[in-house]
Image: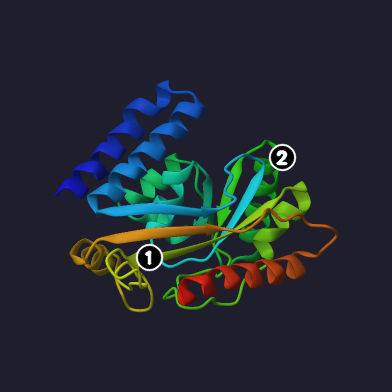
């Protein structure tokens, strides 16, 4: 019930408060709201590594759950790139559109080109963007292949990239939990209920060092980023 109230509150903030706020204050509202929603789930976010949220910056992360967006927003505001279907979700679609998310129609190459161009311009303006190059969610135990297209935005804008790895841990045991998973046939409602019903969870975010293009192609850079995030993921398994 508290979660529904916070969703409604977020809707009201975007609808009635955003028009009167500066961009910086809007970003702060998104961050505060994300923290409150995570608190509804009893989720604590723990950061590790050389973390920065200063633009221009492209954050590249693995992708496990719809919670990933809230986790990163709780640390600092960034503009995400997501599949176009999310823009049509009730309430959530409205919130994501109004808080600066880019939408891509994955089956349309022209859509990808347009989004990359928009991202590149946003990076040149000093924005912090975030992408999930796996293109979909995984169970968090391994990485799917990376799609290199969106990395082109950082290449074109000559912007740095920060590799991140997210993992959801049972707070008592410190072991990875599948409760927040949003993969395969699991519906959003099932994932939300599983997260609410689970024992207390810590969302751990590990950051790698900033990377620069250094004359790499987008495919080469995406490959190197996947290797780095894989190394970060391995530390969760070995901890």
Name the residue at 67% across, 43% down.
123
Q: Which mark is residue 168?
A: 1
- The residue mark sitting in front, 1 or 2, is 1
**In the image, is 205 to the left or to the right of 129?**
left
Tell me if 45 is positioned left or right of 238 in this view.
left
Give the quadrant of the C terminus: bottom left
Which residue bears the numbered disc 2?
A: 124
Q: How many labels does the image show?
A: 2
In the foreground, 93 or 227: 227
Q: Nearer the viewer, residue 163 or 48?
A: 48
Identify the residue at the far left of this view.
1
Q: Position of residue 215 (x, y in %)?
A: 85, 60
Residue shown at 66% from the left, 55% from the top: 209
CB contact under 8 Å: marks 1 and 2: no
Is residue 147 visible in this depiction of the protein? no
Residue visible at 41% across and 39% down in the picture = 31
């Amino acid at each position: 019930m508290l979660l529904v109230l916070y969703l409604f509150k977020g809707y009201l903030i975007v609808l009635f408060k955003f028009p009167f706020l500066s961009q910086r204050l809007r970003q702060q509202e998104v961050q505060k709201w994300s923290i409150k929603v995570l608190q509804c789930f009893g989720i604590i976010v723990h950061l590790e590594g050389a973390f920065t949220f200063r633009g221009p910056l492209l954050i590249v992360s693995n992708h496990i759950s719809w919670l990933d967006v809230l986790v990163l927003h709780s640390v600092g505001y960034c503009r995400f790139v997501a599949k176009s279907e999310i823009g049509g979700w009730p309430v959530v679609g409205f919130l994501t559109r109004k808080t600066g998310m880019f939408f891509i129609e994955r089956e349309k190459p022209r859509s990808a080109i347009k989004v990359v161009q928009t991202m590149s311009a946003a990076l040149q303006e000093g924005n912090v963007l975030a992408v999930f190059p796996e293109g979909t969610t995984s169970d968090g135990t391994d990485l799917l292949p990376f799609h290199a297209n969106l990395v082109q935005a950082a290449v074109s804008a000559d912007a740095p990239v920060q590799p991140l790895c997210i993992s959801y841990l049972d707070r008592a045991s410190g072991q990875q939990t599948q409760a927040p998973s949003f993969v395969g046939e699991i519906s959003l409602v099932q994932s939300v209920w599983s997260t609410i019903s689970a024992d207390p969870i810590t969302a751990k975010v590990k950051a790698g060092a900033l990377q620069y293009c250094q004359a790499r192609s987008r495919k080469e850079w995406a490959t190197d980023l996947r290797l780095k995030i894989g190394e970060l993921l391995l530390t969760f398994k070995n901890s």
